Amino acid sequence: MASESTSIVSEIFDSLPYYDDDLQKYPYLKEKVDQEIARELKATQTLHPRVPPPVTLFADNPLLRAELERVAANKPFPQLDTLRYTLPSPSSTPASDAEWKSALDNAHAQLQHQRLRQQNLALLQTYGANAYRIQNYLLEATAKRTEKALEELQQLTVDVNRERKNTQDRLGKQITALETRWTELISSVLQIEMANVALDAEVERLNKKEAELAEL
């Protein structure tokens, strides 16, 4: 089965913005261009097809997404529930065994929580500084690579614009020279045609004079 071949049509642009100065020569053209640009910008409401769709942050994490929405809305942070960190005694007097057991379980839970906090703080003091240093080093390396890529891209943009300007200046001068030569050739052709018409009239006059002399 033969594969279908698609023909690539190259786009041709006849505009040389670095060389053409029609807008400076003819102000009414610049007014028309400004009106057209304003009309196009007003009519265009959709983004370019190559623009990627908007990114939804924390799409798989509703808690972080809700926190991001809270910060975006400038809402205050909700107050922490401190009741879970207290050690309430039984409310009734005398208290039942179930109430004392519940208070004791809460005390054990609070003690275990404080023990875990101490362990986490000890681990943070031992390894946290190095972890932050490594993270900062990685972030600095990433920032340097990004800045270098940005500088290279900016330099590439400058080089491309400089090359475009030089190319358009060279081609513009060639086009101007060709247009001048074309005008000269058209003028020469017109002069030759006018000379031919004059010669035809002179030949016709001479033929008539010859005929008149022959009759005499």
Image (cartoon, grey):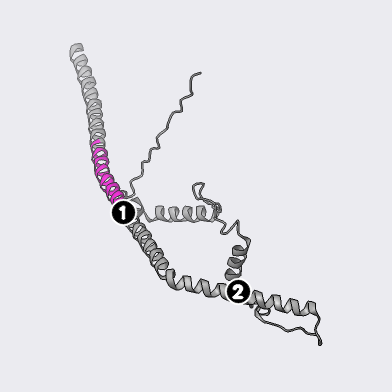
Please provide percent x and percent y for residue 77: 61, 75
Give the mark toward the camera: 2 or 1.
2
Name the outermost residue toward the top.
Answer: 215
Query: At 69% across and 76% down in the image, what residue appears?
Result: 106
Label 2 sits on what residue type?
A: His
Look at the picture and state if 110 lies above or below 60: below
Magenta: predominant secondary structure element? helix
Give the quarter of the image for residue 206: top left
Q: Is residue 171 magenta?
A: yes
Query: At 46% across and 25% down in the image, what residue appears?
Result: 5
Q: Secondary structure at mark 1?
A: helix
Q: In this picture, which residue range is highlighted in magenta?
A: 153-181
Decide which of 2, 126 is in the foreground and name it.
Answer: 126
Q: Is residue 177 magenta?
A: yes
Residue to which mark 2 is pinned: 113
Decide which of 104, 204 is in the foreground and name it.
Answer: 104
Q: Secondary structure at mark 2?
A: helix
Look at the picture and state if 56 lies above or below 119: above
